[in-house]
Amino acid sequence: MYTLLSGLYKYMFRRDEYCILILGLDNAGKTTFLEQTKTRFNRNYKGMSLSKITTTVGLNIGTIDVGKARLMFWDLGGQEELQSLWDKYYAESHGVIYVIDSTDEERLSETKRAFDLLIHS
Ligand SMILES: Nc1nc2c(ncn2[C@@H]2O[C@H](COP(=O)(O)OP(=O)(O)OP(=O)(O)O)[C@@H](O)[C@H]2O)c(=O)[nH]1
Ligand SMILES: [Mg+2]
């Protein structure tokens, strides 16, 4: 009976999970964007001070619930040596947010190159 009821409960309240990648060059603002998003959508999340965010080495994960969906954000480090990891996560993800620092004109062609590489991987 317990199994039946817990199965029913899980079925009724289950959330569809989606994995969203956050990519872009280092210093583009990916982790800042994720922190802002978590603060906005997770009522009890206090959020870290934006000035305390340092460069991401590896992977930073954040989750938010929107309606019946659970969005899992994978924020990857954007440094050149970490970009080779992007395509491994790209294949597993449901969506991509590509962050560009529009004020950093010097790196616009670099970010375009990295994006082109990604979508042709
Ligand atoms: N003025 C301004 N600064 C921002 C904004 N977004 C990010 N920054 C600053 O840009 C710097 C880099 O931000 P991060 O969020 O660490 O960038 P990132 O893309 O996660 O970088 P990596 O982890 O190295 O790939 C930090 O000093 C942020 O405070 C923004 O919208 N406006
Ligand atoms: Mg980061």
Image (spheres, grey):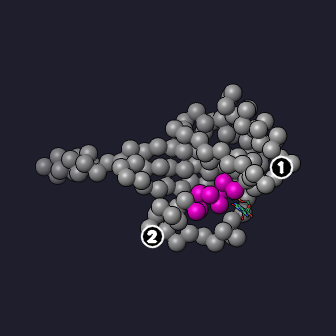
Alpha carbon separation for disc pair 2 and 1: 37 Å
State whether residue 111 appears in this view: yes
Q: Which residues are magenta?
A: 29-36
Of discs 2 and 1, which sits in the foreground?
1
Height in image: 41 above or below 102?
below
In the displayed structure image, the side of residue 55 where residue 1 appears, left or right: left
**Mark sitting on residue 44:** 2
Which is nearer the N-term, disc 2 or disc 1? 2
In the displayed structure image, the side of residue 18 where residue 49 appears, left or right: right
Q: Secondary structure at mark 2?
A: loop
Residue drawn at (83%, 49%), measured in percent from left and top?
105
Residue drawn at (58%, 62%), measured in percent from left and top?
36
Amino acid type, residue under disc 1 in the picture: Glu
Along the line of sight, which residue is nearer the eye, 101 or 96? 101
Q: Are marks 2 and 1 in contact (CB under 8 Å)?
A: no
Q: Is mark 2 within 8 Å of ligand 1?
A: no
Height in image: 42 above or below 112?
below
Residue drawn at (75%, 51%), measured in percent from left and top?
102
Residue indicated by mark 1: 105
Asked if the magenta segment contains residue 34, the reply would be yes
Quadrant position of ligand 1: bottom right
Height in image: 22 above or below 33?
above
In the displayed structure image, the side of residue 55 where residue 42 appears, left or right: left
Packing grade of label 1 (10 A; few <14, some 14-19, many >=20) is few
Q: Which image quarter: residue 89?
A: top right
Amino acid type, residue under disc 2 in the picture: Asn
Asked if the magenta segment contains residue 76, the reply would be no
